Image (cartoon, rainbow, N blue to C red):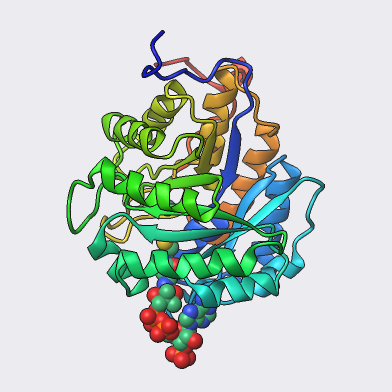
Amino acid sequence: MTGTQPTPLPAGAFVTVCEVGPRDGFQIERGFIPTERKIAIINALFAAGIRHIQATSFVSPRAVPQLADAEEVLAGIDRPEGAVVSALVPNLRGAERALRSRVDAVHLVVSASETHNRKNVNRPIDQSLAEFERIFDLLRGSGIRVEGGIATAFGCPFEGEVPPEQVARIARRYQELGATRVGLGDTTGMATPPTVRAAIRAIRAAAPGLEIGLHFHNTRGVGLACVMTGLAEGVAYYDASVGGLGGCPFAAGATGNISTEDLVYLLQESGYRTGIDLERLIEAARLTEQVIGRTLPGQVMKAGPRLTRHDPGAVATAEG
Ligand code: COA
Ligand code: ZN
């Protein structure tokens, strides 16, 4: 094998599944989800074995009213041993809030597309990056890890294609600032296997040694296909949301992130280790569905694990 070829993640490897539903999913729900119900969902996810979770955001409550209770959520959850609880942070003000709260990590966010960054956080990309330098300075030595997030990494709803070199430039900047992992966000569900491959390879060339995390939305039905591409490229870190919670502001009724249960099912059936109990995860997805009050798009939560046995007496004919 030549040095330029990727090494696929071998079967038996541990894959980190980061639950982002309480941040990416809840943020677009209109009706305010009571804080104690958010806490109950996060605790159910912990009980299923989830250890990486983006629990909330430190953003302007005017921009995202649903997550105005970030401090209360973080103070109320029962953290198991080994849990890594993170919060999304777009600016210095968010990092200052993180410093006063019980988070293990902050997930910074800047978009790879200029227009999306202005729409999302009201500033140019380079201004976000300049502020991140101050955030790294602020949090250095605090015990809070800083993760680099890049939104619209696989396409922008305003600008169209996003050049992989632009994603790689931002990733490299994160690495220079001290990040050890960069998360590529498929903010509006535009990722496809070729765009995923191109972004990963561009980052590996520009920022060797930087760990990559992948964050897909299933807006166009190819979220898990993109995960397969990530695995083939050796990526071992994926975000997902319980029940497939979430949506896309540019596609009414679209599904959200890839569902955590569907992802865990795929990984386990492919021979990877996740440390997650699928049955209990499905219970957490059902609880989430109850709290949200509508059917969620997750598929394994409906069909059950593959070897679920059905009572032959319960069906008249086995059509199909
Ligand atoms: N937490 C709480 N409040 C914050 C804040 C933070 N991290 N950052 C800014 N604010 C408050 C300011 O105090 C100010 O409040 P006021 O109007 O009561 O005086 C107000 O928000 C505006 O502050 P400003 O610095 O002018 O920010 P802005 O209006 O340019 O907005 C962001 C920038 C980043 C704060 C805002 O766009 C935002 O929160 N975006 C988040 C978007 C998001 O979460 N997207 C989805 C995830 S990718
Ligand atoms: Zn997302």
The quadrant in which residue 62 appears is bottom left
Image quadrant holding the C terminus, namely: top left
Nearest the camera: 78 or 200? 200
Left or right of 78 in this view: 218? left
**Whether residue 70 is visible:** no
Which residue lies most toward the top here?
1
Residue 128, percent from left and from top: 39, 67
Q: Can residue 179 be seen?
A: yes
Residue at left offset 53%, top offset 44%: 181
Q: Position of residue 108 (x, y in %)?
A: 49, 60
Residue located 31% across and 40% down the image: 191
Q: In the picture shown, does residue 46 fall above or below 103? A: above
- Quadrant containing the N terminus in the rendered view: top left
x and y percentages locating residue 118 in the rendered image: 29, 70
Quadrant of the rendered image holding ligand 1: bottom left
Q: Is residue 126 above or below residue 174?
A: below
In the picture shown, does residue 171 fall above or below 272?
Answer: below
Instruction: Tally the numbered discs.
Output: 0
Name of the residue lying farthest toward the right? 81
Position of 45 with respect to 169 (left or right) is: right
> Residue at 52% across / 25% down in the picture?
266
Residue at the far bottom in the pictured view = 62
User: Is 257 in front, or is 205?
Assistant: 205
Which one is in front, 164 or 38? 164
Front residue of 200/74: it is: 200
Q: Indicate left or right for 73 with 146 as reference.
A: right
Q: Eyeballing the image, is 18 above or below 197?
A: below
Q: Residue at x 67, y 73 (%)?
A: 71
User: Horizontal and vertical percent for residue 207?
Assistant: 43, 39
Rendering quarter of residue 116: bottom left
